Image (spheres, helix red, strand yellow):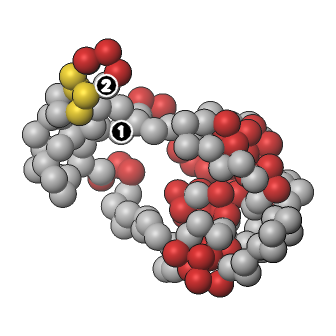
Amino acid sequence: FRRDQGGFKFIFEDVSYLRFRMGHTGFHFHNFFDTTQQLRNKYRTYGHPVPQADNMTISEIHPDLDLFVDCVLNRNATSNKHKTLTTRLEEFEGRIPIAYTIDGYSLARHKEMGQILLEDELGHDKSWHDNPVSPVGKKNSVPLDEKGK
């Protein structure tokens, strides 16, 4: 189980298809953004903020977003921290967000996200590995001088 503020207790269901047999209590749902500016603002202001998100490519902001960009733009994702599943959505074992059960929604939203990403003014020439907080980025980053430049 997991405790929340105020002493509420969330009990995970016991499921065999997940690694630690703990089912879902909810979904972390990123798909409600209509622009990359809205997505950047979410990451700049949410619980674990990325202060420079406004000046980063979507892929640089978070490893989940790096995989998202590579998937939607049909790019090679082998160097990503996270991997895509080979299971088709229709064959996925377990619960999925309700929106994904609407016939045609996933494909339509995938295409829409592709268009949104292609219109992004910051482009897609950098990835999570270019972010100084990523393991690769830390190794490749140049130290700042005393003025932070």
Measured as percent of width and height from the top left, residue 11 is found at 17, 28
Q: Is residue 8 above or below residue 147?
A: above
At 25% across and 28% down in the image, what residue appears?
3
Disc 1 vs disc 2: which is toward the camera? 2
Measured as percent of width and height from the top left, residue 4 is found at 31, 25
Residue 96 marker: 1
Given the current orientation, which residue lies at the most extreme front position? 146
Residue 23 visible in image: yes
Label 1 vs 2, first from the N-terminus: 2
Q: Nearer the viewer, residue 46 or 82?
A: 46
Q: Mark 2 points at which residue?
A: 4
At 81% across and 69% down in the image, what residue appears?
146
Residue 145 location, quadrant: bottom right
Tell me: 6 left or right of 11.
Answer: right
Q: What's the amino acid at mark 2?
A: Asp
Measured as percent of width and height from the top left, residue 108 is found at 63, 44
Tell me: 17 left or right of 104.
Answer: left
Q: In this view, does 18 lie above or below 81?
A: above
Q: What's the amino acid at mark 1?
A: Ile
Residue 40 location, quadrant: top right
Tell me: 85 left or right of 129.
Answer: left
Residue 22 marker: none
At 21% across and 40% down in the image, what residue appears?
23
Is disc 1 placed on a helix, strand or loop? loop
Q: How many residues crowd around disc 1 within 10 Å: few (fewer than 14), some, or many (20 or more)?
A: some
Q: Which of 118 and 123 is in front in this view?
A: 123
